[in-house]
């Protein structure tokens, strides 16, 4: 029996009220509520355009195809992220080039991007060409992981130097910022998610943020089968004409029922983030006093962390070797689950996942920090409304379980 979930959406009567209104209006496909949701949320983030989609995965894919990513192209992405970051690259026909992360921020390591470019690509006719495959390096898809922005300014510098494209996977970082600037305003397209594990939810859903009007129009067309006039616009014009289709596209449309939930959630976004930031401080203080074996998340100067997830790492050097550390992590998570505290590992090391491991023949040590984060990270309960007592129970339980596990050695860690 789970007593403390890993996350929990914050709903009140507003969501039901707005959904009822959408149902009564009779408009349940993409319509005025989606437009309103796009407008209000993009204004909140300070961007000119929001394009709502069915998920962050389809938002990423739509951005990628709209900006020309495809076969014969390489794309750099972090090796420690949710699989959808890299799957969406594969869906376009392009080839992902994994890059390791920094253990302290869980974000892509800029020095490694430079090293990958220098050692695998040659500048030919203003394009970076892969020495082995002949693919052209199209761009970089950095992730703002767990609610903390990556070093996007340094990434933009590299992109500018070589004429690369950048699409930011901000799936878990709606509301995050650097110097008060939100994803979507760093000069690139950014994609957020409304899955229930993210800042706010529409059940499933996503949104692309951009300040590029022309690109936004193209993404709106491709979101809806390549139609040059949206159903909403057609309705407003009282037109009976079918739209024209000069391009081929998808059906990645969010609907007005989801957008109605999104509108109610947007009203709560700031208080949800504020609550989680305070809860993160409480965890930080409790852990620093009671569990020195854990590294708690950092918030660099001028960065604003939204703590979509509160992710810690077991310190490897506290244990005799990495296998013991890793097995301690797994045992700890199992024991927490048994007493009703839900946890997860932070996210995946992509190079350990079957499809990627087999296709690219990766070994665990190819991206060592990503490997360590896969094996030693711990995502703890974090949601609007989590109580001090619940947080204390999580911390005290971890202390007690670690004290017991410390005496158990002979363990294996599946790589
Ligand atoms: C959650 C997540 C996604 C996928 O979001 P969906 O809306 O579920 O498609 C992609 N990338 C990252 C980094 C995520 O955390």
Image (cartoon, rainbow, N blue to C red):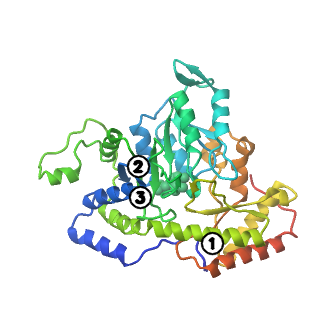
Q: Looking at the rendered structure, which numbered label has been put on residue 209?
A: 2
From this viewpoint, is residue 150 visible?
A: yes
Q: Measure the C-alpha gap from mark 2 to mark 1.
A: 32 Å
Of pointers 3 and 1, the one earlier in the residue sequence: 3
Q: Nearer the viewer, mark 2 or mark 1?
A: 2
Where's residue 389, x and y in %?
64, 82
Furthest toward the top, the residue is 125
Q: Measure the C-alpha gap from mark 3 to mark 1.
A: 24 Å
Q: Residue at x 56, y 68 (%)?
A: 276
Q: Quadrant of residue 379?
A: bottom right
Where's residue 319, x and y in %?
85, 60
The local secondary structure at tag 3 comes to loop
Q: Residue at x 54, y 71 (%)?
A: 275
Q: Are marks 2 and 1 in contact (CB under 8 Å)?
A: no
208 vs 170, left or right, is left
Residue position marked by numbered label 3 in the rendering: 205
Where's residue 359, x and y in %?
62, 39
Q: Looking at the rendered structure, which numbered label has been put on residue 342?
A: 1
In front: 173, or 343? 173
């Amino acid at each position: 029996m789970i007593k403390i979930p890993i996350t929990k959406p914050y709903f009140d009567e507003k969501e039901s009220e707005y959904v009822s209104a959408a149902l009564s209006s009779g408009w349940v496909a993409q319509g005025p509520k989606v437009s309103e949701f796009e407008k209000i949320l993009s204004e909140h983030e300070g961007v000119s355009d929001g394009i709502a989609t069915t998920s962050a995965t389809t938002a990423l894919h739509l951005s990628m195809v709209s900006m020309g990513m495809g076969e014969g192209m390489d794309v750099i992405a972090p090796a420690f992220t949710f699989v959808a970051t890299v799957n969406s690259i594969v869906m376009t026909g392009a080839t992902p080039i994994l890059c390791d992360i920094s253990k302290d921020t869980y974000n892509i390591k800029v020095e490694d991007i430079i090293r990958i470019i220098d050692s695998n690509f040659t500048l030919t006719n203003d394009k970076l060409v892969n020495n082995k495959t002949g693919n052209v390096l199209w761009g970089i898809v950095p992730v703002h992981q767990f609610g903390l922005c990556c070093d996007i300014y340094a990434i933009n510098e590299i992109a500018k130097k070589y004429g690369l494209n950048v699409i930011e996977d901000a799936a878990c970082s709606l509301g995050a910022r650097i110097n008060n600037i939100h994803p979507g305003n760093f000069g690139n397209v950014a994609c957020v998610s409304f899955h229930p594990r993210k800042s706010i939810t529409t059940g499933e859903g996503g949104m692309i943020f951009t300040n590029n009007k022309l690109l936004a129009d193209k993404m709106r067309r491709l979101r809806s089968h390549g139609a040059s006039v949206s159903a909403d616009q057609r309705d407003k014009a009282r037109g009976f004409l079918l739209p024209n289709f000069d391009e081929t596209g998808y059906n990645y449309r969010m609907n007005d029922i989801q957008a109605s939930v999104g509108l109610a959630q947007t009203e709560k976004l700031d208080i949800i983030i504020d609550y989680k930031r305070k809860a993160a401080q409480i965890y930080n203080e409790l852990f620093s006093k009671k569990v020195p074996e854990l590294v708690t998340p950092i918030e660099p100067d001028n960065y604003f962390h939204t703590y979509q997830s509160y992710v810690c790492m077991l310190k490897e050097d506290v244990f005799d070797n990495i296998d013991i550390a890793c097995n301690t992590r797994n045992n700890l998570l199992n024991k927490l689950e048994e007493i009703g505290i839900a946890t997860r590992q932070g996210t995946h090391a992509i190079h350990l996942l079957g499809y990627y491991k087999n296709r690219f023949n990766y070994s665990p040590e190819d991206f060592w920090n990503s490997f360590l984060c896969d094996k030693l990270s711990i995502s703890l309960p974090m949601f609007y409304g989590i109580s001090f007592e619940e947080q204390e129970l999580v911390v005290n339980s971890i202390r007690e379980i670690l004290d017991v596990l410390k005496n158990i050695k002979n363990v294996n860690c599946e790589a």
